[in-house]
Image (cartoon, rainbow, N blue to C red):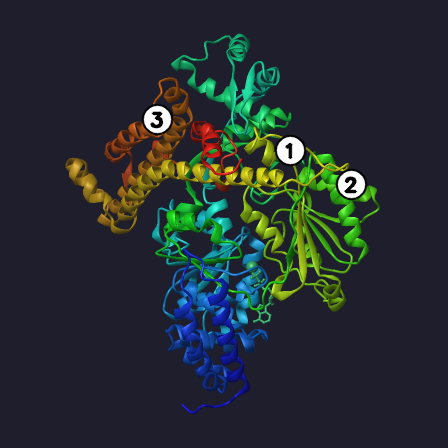
């Protein structure tokens, strides 16, 4: 090929060299992927460009059909994006695509254009004959991204679809039939759960898992990893939580119960135990009352540890949870049933219906089903170790297209929350006076309201973006970069939405840039530095000017929870501002402790889940053989040869096979739901029993869970044989309803909020924070 000196080629050649330098200079971080093989492909991509450029659209599509190599996918993808979106992907975006095509997590800063990088990777997998699920954090982004990227997919001849909460089964089937399917993570999980209960192969919707590309990968794979997705069925009456809430309400803090310093656990004292026993007229610590003891603890947890407007809000007579990792109302999420009812009782609300859990699946398990996983996010490096440990994923740190020039100022530290908030309001007022847009990130809803009220008193108009108006949050965040805008937002509200200087219309964008761009103010450090980074990242996109600063105080929950015994540094200014390095070290130390605690919780919860997960896999493999391969009839015929002979005279083999399948599936599904219920009970109760005897709760859990599981298959077989011998079977089939073997008439799905309830693990971990505090360097 001749050296055609097209401007395009020259430009890319130049860019590659510059990029190589930048990669060398500051991006070879230890423990991350070496980008050189990807960089080495870029000249090849550029080299193919002239030939690809000349193709008509149809020619592009047919060439794509014959292309499976990395460089070819990038060259065609780049051209398809240029034609379809009018945007030519930058080299760095292709590096991200290449990392994802190699099954890695691409770390690319906010605003670098991950949507396009991910779409090109998805198209690449599709061109290689794979089926791709592109997972987003919510419905809105799934639909937005699928529709946004559709022209690119069309040009490459790759079909694309999306699913959302409201999608009908027909829409879902159609979306899954596409080569690339966008959807919120939870919906992919719910479809797996629903499919797992079908009794007819034709009713399956989702198809086998193949390639998962995960957007905001750290948030999904780490922060939300252990959120169980639940499929429930049938309605049962709620327990009498109101009485229990009343008992808990009368208990006196400090006297009747104590909470630990992290505020994660609450314990009855002897005095409190006596009070409860007197109120209920029972002896709590006898085996007969383990259930009651659990309920007392749940009610006490609801009373003492869950705070209105921090952990939940009351809206329309219902409890709406606030997601700790996102600081916004988590739609459809509930706590475990008992805790949810207990909080409803605490707030004097009517108790919502609860159903029997038929099956549940954590996001970590969902992702684990895919043979290929990759993803993208702005903040992965700090959780690199966990991504490797839990998912075997490597991180490729992709440099920004234009260097980030955002100025991250040092924290401003104060003695008290009041001093901090005063200073924050003054600060916002002075930046606002210059005309620069200000985005204030808060830790929870209550704080966002407090700060908004404080700003209003100073006659500063602001838009509050929090749990209470999340419907419009994407549109509001998109305008947060407008001249003079002040936006108060809880963490991650409007995530995935680009904040352009000058808002969506780009009005005054040059002027705003000259003034200094978007200024981000954090009202406190988050429980992990990664979330701080995400907030800062809202400013300074694509080389824009911008700045960020955090205001913290020694009364912030982070400090009081995780560094409670640090000596209060002497304050040095009239406004409470602290100037000592020691104060800064305390905050950072508290953050490291908090990060350690959440990692330990993840590890431990996963150890429990792993066992349940292994058992589920075995059950599902068996179920699949019954569903697809017709394993049921031979098994039943072998056990009941006489009955089989009798039935063979009245019904065809096909009818008998179907009857046997229905009977076996019913008992198998029933037994699994019972087993799950049993495991939940064991897990709840085990800590109380294990702790008393100095035993390891996890060992105890295994001791009960393993034998129970080995009994499960035998029980299913026995019950199936019994049904086979007794249920009426005619030429039309088996009448399972006559034997009371009805499937749940209605099922529904929901998410359970991750672990706000001090479960066994949590309680067992109450000493972890203390240990981590002592082993970490720092104060
Ligand atoms: P991220 O997910 O990385 O935060 P987005 O995918 O939301 O970023 O993209 C941010 C913005 O950058 C969008 O407005 C998008 O249109 C724009 N963009 C992405 N790629 C390019 C490109 N190659 N050229 C110009 N604009 C781009
Ligand atoms: Mg994005």
Kindly identify which residue carries mark 3.
Answer: 696
Using a 10 Å C-alpha cutoff, classify the residue at mark 2 as few (fewer than 14 neighbours), some (14 to 19) or many (20 or more): some
Q: Secondary structure at mark 1?
A: loop
Relative depth, front residue between 502 and 159: 502
Q: Is residue 141 left or right of residue 194?
A: right
Residue at 41 percent of width and 74 percent of height: 40
The answer to whether the residue labelled 3 contacts the one labelled 1, judged by CB atoms less than 8 Å apart, is no
Is 404 on the left or on the right of 512, as rendered?
left
Q: Residue furthest right?
A: 459
Please report the residue visible at 76 percent of the width from the left and 49 percent of the height from the top. 428
Across and down, in percent, residue 483 comes to: 77, 60
Q: Earlier in the sequence, mark 3 or mark 2?
A: 2
Q: Quadrant of ligand 1?
A: bottom right
Q: CA distance from mark 1 to mark 2?
A: 27 Å
Question: Which mark sits nearer the N-terminus, 1 or 2?
Answer: 2
Q: Which residue is mark 1?
A: 569
Return the residue at label 2: 454
- Residue 180 position, x and y percent, is 45, 63
- Determine the image quadrant of residue 373: bottom left
Viewer can see residue 437:
yes
Tell us which disc is closer to us: 1 or 2: 1
Report how far apart the C-alphas of labels 3 and 2 lie in the structure: 49 Å
* Disc with the residue nearer the chain's start (3 vs 1): 1
Relative image position of residue 449 (x, y in whole percent): 72, 40
């Amino acid at each position: 090929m001749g050296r055609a000196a097209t401007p395009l080629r020259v430009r890319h050649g130049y860019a590659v060299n510059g990029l190589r330098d930048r990669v060398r200079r500051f991006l070879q971080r230890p423990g991350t992927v070496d980008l050189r093989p990807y960089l080495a492909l870029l000249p090849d991509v550029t080299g193919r460009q002239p030939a690809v450029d000349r193709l008509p659209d149809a020619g592009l599509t047919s060439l794509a059909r014959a292309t499976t190599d990395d460089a070819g996918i990038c060259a065609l993808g780049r051209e398809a994006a240029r034609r379809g979106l009018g945007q030519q992907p930058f080299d760095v975006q292709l590096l991200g695509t290449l990392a994802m095509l190699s099954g890695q997590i691409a770390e690319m800063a906010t605003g670098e254009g991950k949507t396009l990088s991910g779409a090109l990777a998805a198209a690449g997998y599709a061109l290689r004959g794979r089926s791709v699920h592109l997972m987003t954090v919510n419905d809105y982004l799934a639909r937005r991204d699928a529709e946004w990227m559709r022209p690119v997919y069309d040009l490459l001849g790759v079909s694309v679809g999306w699913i959302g909460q409201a999608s009908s089964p027909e829409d879902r089937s159609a979306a899954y039939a596409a080569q690339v399917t966008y959807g919120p993570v939870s919906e992919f999980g719910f479809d797996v759960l629903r499919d797992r209960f079908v009794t007819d192969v034709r009713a399956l919707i989702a198809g086998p898992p193949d390639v998962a590309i995960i957007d905001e990968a750290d948030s999904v794979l780490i922060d939300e990893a252990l959120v169980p997705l639940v499929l429930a069925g049938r309605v049962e009456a709620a327990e009498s939580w109101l009485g229990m809430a009343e008992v808990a309400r009368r208990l006196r803090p400090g006297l009747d119960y104590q909470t630990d310093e992290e505020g994660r656990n609450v314990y009855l004292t002897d005095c409190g135990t006596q009070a409860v026993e007197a109120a209920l007229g029972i002896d709590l610590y006898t085996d007969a009352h383990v259930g009651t003891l659990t309920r007392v603890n749940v009610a006490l947890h609801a009373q003492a540890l869950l705070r209105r407007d921090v952990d939940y809000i009351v809206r329309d007579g219902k409890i709406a949870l606030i997601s700790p990792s996102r600081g916004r109302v988590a739609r459809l999420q509930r706590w475990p049933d008992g805790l949810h009812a207990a909080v409803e009782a605490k707030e004097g609300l009517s108790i919502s219906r609860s159903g029997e859990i038929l099956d549940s699946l954590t996001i970590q398990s969902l992702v684990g089903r895919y043979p290929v996983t990759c993803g993208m996010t702005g903040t992965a490096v700090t959780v690199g170790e966990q991504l490797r440990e839990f998912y075997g994923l490597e991180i490729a740190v992709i440099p920004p297209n234009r260097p980030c020039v955002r100025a991250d100022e040092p924290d401003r530290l104060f003695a008290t929350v009041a001093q901090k908030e005063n200073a924050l309001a003054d600060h916002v007022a002075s930046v606002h006076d210059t005309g620069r847009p200000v985005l204030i990130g808060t830790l929870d809803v209550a704080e966002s309201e407090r700060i908004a009220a404080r700003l209003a008193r100073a006659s500063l108009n602001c838009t509050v973006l929090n749990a209470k108006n999340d419907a419009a949050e994407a549109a509001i965040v998109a305008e947060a970069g407008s001249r003079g805008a002040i936006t108060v937002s809880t963490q991650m509200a409007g995530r995935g939405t680009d904040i352009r200087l000058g808002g969506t219309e780009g009005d005054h964008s040059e002027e705003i840039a000259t003034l200094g761009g978007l200024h981000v103010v954090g009202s406190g450090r988050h429980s992990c530095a990664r979330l701080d980074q995400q907030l800062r990242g809202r400013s300074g996109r694509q080389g824009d000017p911008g700045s960020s600063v955090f205001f913290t105080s020694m009364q912030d929950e982070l400090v009081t929870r995780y560094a409670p015994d640090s000596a209060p540094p002497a304050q040095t200014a009239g406004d409470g501002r602290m100037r000592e390095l020691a104060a800064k070290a305390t905050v950072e130390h508290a953050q490291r402790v908090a990060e350690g605690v959440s990692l330990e919780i993840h590890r431990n919860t996963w150890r429990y889940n792993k066992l349940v997960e292994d058992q589920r896999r075995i059950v599902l493999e068996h179920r699949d053989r019954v569903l697809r391969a017709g394993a049921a009839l031979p098994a039943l015929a072998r056990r009941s040869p006489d009955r089989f002979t009798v039935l063979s005279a009245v019904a065809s083999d096909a009818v008998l096979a179907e009857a046997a399948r229905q009977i076996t599936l019913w008992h198998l599904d029933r037994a699994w739901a019972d087993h799950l219920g049993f495991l939940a009970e064991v897990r709840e109760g085990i800590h109380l029993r294990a702790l008393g005897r100095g035993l390891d709760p996890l060992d105890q859990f295994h001791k009960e869970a393993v034998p129970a599981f080995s009994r499960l298959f035998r029980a299913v077989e026995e019950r199936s044989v019994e049904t086979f011998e007794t249920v009426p079977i005619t030429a039309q089939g088996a009448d399972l309803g006559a034997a009371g073997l009805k499937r749940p008439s209605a099922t529904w799905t929901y998410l359970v909020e991750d672990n706000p309830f001090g479960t066994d693990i949590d309680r067992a971990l109450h000493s972890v924070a203390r240990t981590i505090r002592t082993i970490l360097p720092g104060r």
